[in-house]
Amino acid sequence: MLRVSDLRIKTKNKEIVKGISFTVKDGEIVGIVGESGSGKTLTALSVADLLPEGVSAQGSIELDNDKNMLEMSETELRSIKGDKIGMIFQEPMTSLNPTMRIGRQVIEPLVIHKKTDKKLMKYMAVSMLEAVGLEDAEEICNKYPHELSGGMRQRVMIAMAMINEPSLLIADEPTTALDVVVQKQIIDLIKKINEDNNTSVIFITHNLKLVRQFCDKVLVMKDGMIVEQGTPERIFNEPKEQYTRELINAIPVRTRRKVQKQEKLENEKVVAVNE
């Protein structure tokens, strides 16, 4: 579904991402983990064609076996961004337009890509806000971002990313600055979108606990390179790299035990069902 080959991301004086390659299958959730500065966010931004000014990418990024996105024209890329690829940013307060009502922001991808009539777009916006768990969606459409809580703003971001039903959803630290309860709600929502629509997900995070519970495959990045990749079970139970072991050991012991206990219970349920 997505194939990234020999991706290199550079500023004028420095190579930040150093020739990484990976794939994402249809309906697969791929977690990218690593410390700050490892290159994980820039990798996600390059796939979404949202690299900041002064940063360039080389290599190959192919979506649905199409041509290399890094060689596409602006017109071709515009037909993909916000349509085939949706992006959830880590801080919705700075990503949402503070001067624009929520409803207008949610339908913006429709205006750009679908050009449907206003009445239908409003209906779709309300329906999508309801789908991401926001009550009183019609009322929320008339509000501004500062009138919503952090969790509500993040749900608005998810609604914007999903309104065109993209085949790939990129979530860059989507639970940052949210409390534990809201974090779980957002993760459960992304998982539901993945299961209901067979949407592929690239999930950027530093939280290995989430990766273990949530992802089908894990990429571990360090200094702009993928140092290890595999299933969560393999990465956590048989890490090959010292850096990966250090990341795992940084998880609080109590949290690790809780996750292991949960995994054991789930495995026992599977065995019971099979018997």
Image (tube, helix red, strand yellow):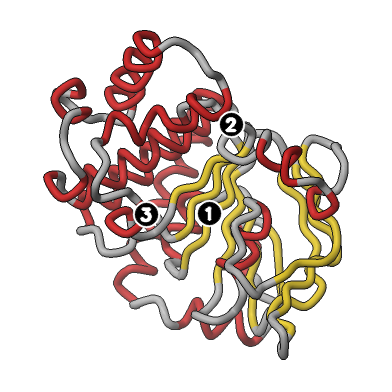
Q: Position of residue 130 (x, y in %)?
A: 27, 23
Image depth: mark 1 or mark 2 in front? 2
Image depth: mark 2 or mark 3 in front? 3
Inter-mark Cα distance, 1 to 3: 18 Å
Mark 2 lies on a secondary structure that is loop
From the image, tell me which residue sits under label 3.
95
Inter-mark Cα distance, 2 to 3: 19 Å
Mark 1 lies on a secondary structure that is strand
Q: Position of residue 203 (x, y in %)?
A: 53, 54
Looking at marks 2 and 3 on the same chain, the residue that comes earlier in the sequence is marked by 3
Image position of 181 (left or right of 3): left
Looking at marks 1 and 2 on the same chain, the residue that comes earlier in the sequence is marked by 2
The structure residue drawn at horizontal position 70% and vertical position 65%, both measured from the top left corner, is 229
From the image, tell me which residue sits under label 2.
166
Image depth: mark 1 or mark 3 in front? 3
Image position of 117 (left or right of 94): right
Query: Quarter holding the C terminus?
Result: top right
Is the residue under label 3 in contact with that under label 1 (CB below 8 Å)? Answer: no
- Judge by depth and name the residue closer to the eye, 194 or 110: 110
Sort mark 1 into few (<14), some (14-19) or many (20+) by Cα contacts within 10 Å.
many
From the image, tell me which residue sits under label 1.
203
| Image position of 108 with respect to 220: above or below | above
Quarter-wise, where is residue 224 in the image?
A: bottom right
Residue extending farthest to the bottom is 13
Residue 18 seen by the camera: yes
Q: Position of residue 227 (x, y in %)?
A: 72, 77
Q: Hey, what amino acid is under mark 3?
A: Ser
